């Protein structure tokens, strides 16, 4: 049984989907939760990207219909892991994670630094991500965001 915080995150993500928001927006709820875990000291992360990846993985496994990255968008290994997580989330049979594996994962993350979820680190990550995109792509996103803001108001 997932803990209450995770259930609330799933509810918020499902609400986003019901409102017609994109799966990536819904998955953002899980990423936000993961960043909070690092900030609270629940565990660490080697980089902001790792915290984001953990959040996206949790979202896919929770059944958020976030497709894995296309070929060429990410490393083959990353894409394959995302595909596996996506399949696990879409299949409605849940297999219990082994306690030993769960403890090992937690122990490994506890050894990682917490500074990776600082405002500065996340700001740098956001800027790097934006710089990798084309001007047209950023402009399209901004227009889409502006139009959804108008609808909500």
Image: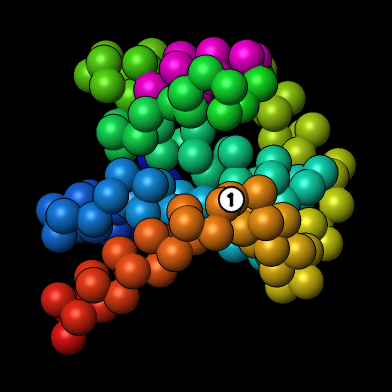
Indicate whether 27 appears above or below 147. above
Indicate whether 15 appears above or below 119. above
Q: Give the image location of residue 84, x and y in percent.
A: 46, 14
Q: Is residue 46 magenta?
A: no
Q: Which residues are magenta?
A: 76-86
Q: Give the image location of residue 122, x and y in percent.
A: 70, 63
Residue shown at 54% from the left, 13% from the top: 80
Indicate whether 103 appears above or below 37. above
Residue shown at 85% from the left, 52% from the top: 113
Q: Give the image location of residue 137, x and y in percent.
A: 47, 54
In the foreground, 53 or 40: 53
Q: Residues within 10 Å of mark 1 (few under 14, many from 20)?
A: few
Look at the image and tell me whether residue 43 can be seen. no
Q: Give the image location of residue 103, x and y in percent.
A: 68, 28
In the foreground, 59 or 2: 59
Quick check: 151 left or right of 11? left
Q: Mark 1 — residue?
A: 133
Quadrant holding the C terminus: bottom left
Quadrant holding the N terminus: top left
Q: Secondary structure at mark 1?
A: loop
Q: Is residue 84 magenta?
A: yes
The total number of labels drawn is 1
Magenta span: chief secondary structure: helix
Look at the image and tell me whether residue 143 can be seen. yes
In the foreground, 152 or 27: 152
């Amino acid at each position: 049984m997932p803990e209450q915080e995770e259930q609330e995150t799933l509810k918020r993500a499902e609400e986003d989907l019901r409102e017609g928001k994109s799966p990536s927006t819904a998955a953002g709820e899980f990423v936000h939760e993961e960043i909070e875990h690092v900030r609270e000291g629940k565990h660490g992360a080697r980089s902001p990207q790792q915290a984001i990846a953990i959040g996206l993985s949790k979202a896919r496994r929770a059944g958020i219909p976030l497709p894995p990255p296309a070929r060429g968008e990410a490393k083959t290994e990353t894409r394959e892991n995302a595909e596996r997580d996506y399949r696990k989330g879409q299949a409605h049979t849940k297999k219990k994670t082994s306690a030993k594996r769960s403890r090992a994962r937690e122990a490994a993350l506890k050894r990682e630094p917490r500074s990776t979820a600082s405002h500065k680190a996340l700001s740098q990550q956001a800027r790097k991500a934006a710089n990798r995109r084309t001007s047209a792509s950023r402009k399209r996103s901004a227009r889409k965001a502006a139009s959804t803001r108008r609808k909500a108001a």
